[in-house]
Amino acid sequence: MTGQAQEYDFFPAHVVRTRRLGPTLLRVTFGGEALRGFASGGRDQSFSLFLPRPGQAEPNLPYAQGEGWFAAWRALPAHERAVMRSYTIRAQRAEPPEVDVDFALHGTGADAGPATTWASTAGPGARVVLLGPAVADNRSVAFRPPADAGFVLLLADETALPAVGGILEWLPAGTRTLAWIEVPDAADIQDLPAPGGADITWLVRAPGAPSGLLPALRAAGLPDGAPYAWIAGESGTVKELRRHLVRERGVDRRAVAFSGYWRRGASEDRLREEAYAGQS
Ligand SMILES: Cc1cc2nc3c(=O)[nH]c(=O)nc-3n(C[C@H](O)[C@H](O)[C@H](O)COP(=O)(O)OP(=O)(O)OC[C@H]3O[C@@H](n4cnc5c(N)ncnc54)[C@H](O)[C@@H]3O)c2cc1C
């Protein structure tokens, strides 16, 4: 016994409702009594979402096995085991226990990933499992600015827009914040509540065009002082943005939190297998 609370747990849940936020973004609200124990730390709180395969009533996930669940899940045939994808908690409410997750839908037909296909057709009652925080102070919150940051820089595409929303709601008043957010359609632009105030620049990426985030950042004048930067989105773009900040702007690399949320041409399964191969 260590006396420490378990940091993560499995939370079976179901779809309560869905709502279109724009052409690309779909909000799925999950509910269920188990979510009373889900302890989002806010900001960019991420978690793993397990989804059923087509034709299954619930995700095939041997979580009752405790610590051996991952090996047992991985040992299942690929077409039978639950789809596992990373998402962000956009909002959590206590009564009734609910969480909102905003899905950036991408691709159509065979090009669409299984999470996108699932979200596009999910209706009330659809069953899922969340693997997420049981304590609010957990390692799946990456946005951790130091108290002495001169200003905050946020750079995101549509997959990281839910995280930016959570971060802006969390930031205390008086924090100078500049955000660049790129979405695929002007109608995806949202009114983001930012009690602390923020200068938000929205970019709209034309279909098939490269990201405009780096050119926009390059052209921008930044305030004086040392920033804390948070970057998330497509991996290649995230790397370029980080490199620009560290090499061309001289930002301290320890003050740049960055995360590839997806990689062009690679499913999350492939990214996980690569990470797994790198460890073994
Ligand atoms: C910590 C973290 C938090 C995340 N939070 C969110 C979130 O809140 N909302 C959200 O929508 N996404 C979020 N993502 C990204 C999401 O996990 C990926 O987009 C995921 O690949 C979607 O799964 P899929 O089954 O639809 O596609 P996959 O099966 O994983 O991929 C299929 C194909 O689609 C491509 N692809 C994947 N995502 C996109 C995209 N957005 N646009 C274009 N092509 C794509 C892949 O390159 C691949 O070629 C997050 C990722 C991480 C790591």
Image: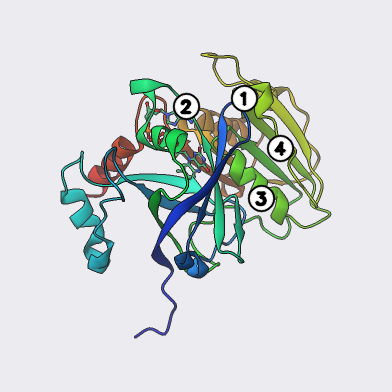
- Tell which tag, 3 or 1, sits nearer the viewer: 3
Could you tell which of marks 4 and 3 lies nearer the N-terminus?
A: 3
> In the image, what residue type sits under mark 3?
Ile
* 207 relative to 134, above or below: above
> In the image, what residue type sits under mark 2?
His
Could you tell which of marks 1 and 4 lies nearer the N-terminus?
A: 4
Write down the quadrant of residue 78 in the picture.
Answer: top left
- Tell which tag, 1 or 4, sits nearer the viewer: 4
> In the image, what residue type sits under mark 4?
Ala
Give the residue pinned by disc 1: 214
Disc 4 crowd rating (10 Å Cα; few below 14, some 14-19, many 20+) is many
Checking the image for residue 79, the label placed there is none
Checking the image for residue 167, the label placed there is 3
Q: Is residue 194 visible?
A: yes
Residue 97: horizontal and vertical position, in percent?
Answer: 55, 63
Colouring scheme, one of rainbow, by chain, secondary structure, one colour: rainbow
> In the image, what residue type sits under mark 1?
Leu
Residue drawn at 71 percent across, 37 percent down: 179
Give the CA separation, mark 2 to mark 4. 23 Å
Could you tell which of marks 2 and 3 lies nearer the N-terminus?
A: 2
Give the CA separation, mark 2 to mark 1. 22 Å
Whether ligand 1 has any atom under 8 Å from the Cβ at mark 2 is answered as: yes
Foreground pick, 75 / 227: 75
Q: Regarding mark 2 in the picture, which secondary structure is present there?
A: loop
Q: Regarding mark 4 in the picture, which secondary structure is present there?
A: strand
